[in-house]
Amino acid sequence: MKKLLQLTVNTVPREVAVHAHATLGEVLREELGLTGTKIGCGEGDCGACTVLLDGEPVNSCLVLALQASGREVTTIEGLADGEGLHPVQAAFVQAGAIQCGFCSPGMILSATALLRRMPAPSELDVRTALSGNLCRCTGYQKIVEATLGAARDLATEGEQASSRRRP
Amino acid sequence: MQTVRFDFVEPTTLDEAVALMAEHGHEAAAVAGGTDLLRDIRTGKRQPALVISLARLHTLSGVRPNDDGGLTVGPLTTMAELARSAVVRERAPALAEAAGHVGSPQVRNRATIGGNLCNARPCADTAPPVIVHSATLELTGKGGTREVAAKDFIINPGQTQIETNELLTAIRLPAPGGPAGSAFETLTNRKAVEITITSSTAWLMLDGDRVAQARICLGSVGPTPLPGLHGEGLLRGADPTPDKLAEAAKACVADASSIDDFRGSADFRNHLVEVLTRRALTRALAWALTRGRGGLS
């Protein structure tokens, strides 16, 4: 029997009937059509299914959908502003941090959560924050560079925005 | 991978949760973060008919510093919360270190200390810190609550003293009677999303220049976390020189019951017991000395 689940996905309130055994990842992909979230290992090892739950990265394969009731979920589809890429997405493209792309949604969400919490991370901070996201193509170097680049871009944007606000 | 169908309830009060546990017994599985349970369900290890989510029992979450210098940790506190909690880092540094080592950032945002203790894996990283800090665990069932010493809680791999109708409702770390410190040391094949090959956790309390009490707990070298009794005995009342700490660390090898498996040989694990225990004792001593000088306990 299905149960009614109410949650907010990418700032939009959603209501969806789900099986009690369905994971958040399955519901995002199969019920809500948000296939940007990838399911890799299904056991919390690879991080491909990473989404933000109330702003914190979690493996959506290890969260029951019903456990997300009343909470806020951000998927990769929620980052871009219309056609305009989110600064972290833009930095990944710029740095060549994407090859096959399967890990990219999870990787970008982990990086985004880090930069929200810590706007000027060290390389070690970045590597730690991304340690739950596996990439089998890039060797991680460009992903780390992209995240550090995004931090610089966001800082510059912030400075420009605050100088525009000054009288 | 297989789909196991089950029903799901998410009670909002402890009474309701305990009543559900009593009603459904072995058919039910309590879930906090779900990082172990969902894996176990997917691999067919567990097939509950009902999953009882504890996530809305907000009184069971968070860390409360007690006025006497102790700590009460709610079982639903996540690894991430423990790792970044200033008061846990201050009063139970080994616990903050162990929690910060579990899984990955994503897992630490979901996995809870209660789940880690109740699943009772030989490699459960938060069990040794809780044991060396002499914690007591509060278990609540329909008939009321009872307390169990953390060192007696885990009986076998996956088996604890908790009854099917009980829930772990508090983890209490008492205040030490003097300047004390603790540290957690571990080795894994890679730094994240890994299972501990061997860990050693040490707690030391000083009386002046001497060790008043020492507690050591070894992880992943036996079916349950094992106390480092030989090392503890050598340290009691001793002058904690580097040589003495090294001697105590070496003595703990006799406490381990290491086995060969794909993560490492028994010989390698025994070597790690010595090395990691020496490091843990050295850092625990440094903490205790800082407390002694700062007048903190």
Image (spheres, coloured by chain):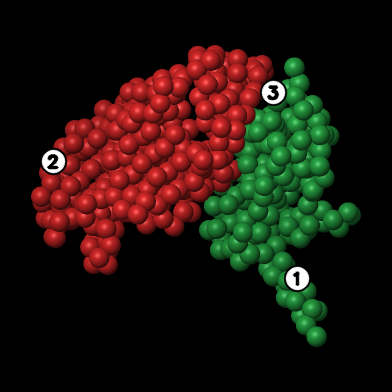
Chain colours: A green, B red
Query: Looking at this view, is B78 or B267 the one in front?
Result: B78
Q: Residue at x 81, y 34 (%)?
A: A15
Instruction: Tell me which amino acid carries mark 2.
Output: Gly
Residue B68 shown left or right of residue A74 in the figure: left
Whether residue B2 is visible here, answered yes or no, is no
Secondary element under disc 2, as helix, strand or loop, is helix
Residue B128 shown left or right of residue B116 in the figure: left
Image height of B133 relative to B40, above or below: below
Q: Which residue is mark 1?
A: A157
Secondary element under disc 3, as helix, strand or loop, is loop
Label 2, label 3: how far apart the Cα atoms are = 52 Å
- Residue B50: x, y in percent? 60, 18
Instruction: Tell me which amino acid carries mark 3.
Output: Ala
Residue B198 shown left or right of residue B37 in the figure: left
Residue A65 shown left or right of residue B11 in the figure: right
The mark lying in front, picked from 2 and 3, is 3
Which comes sooner in the sequence, label 1 or label 3? Answer: 3
Q: Which residue is mark 3?
A: A20
Chain for mark 2?
Answer: B
- Determine whether label 1 and label 3 are within 8 Å by CB: no
Q: Which residue is mark 2?
A: B233
- Determine whether label 2 and label 1 are within 8 Å by CB: no
- Residue B153: x, y in percent? 33, 28
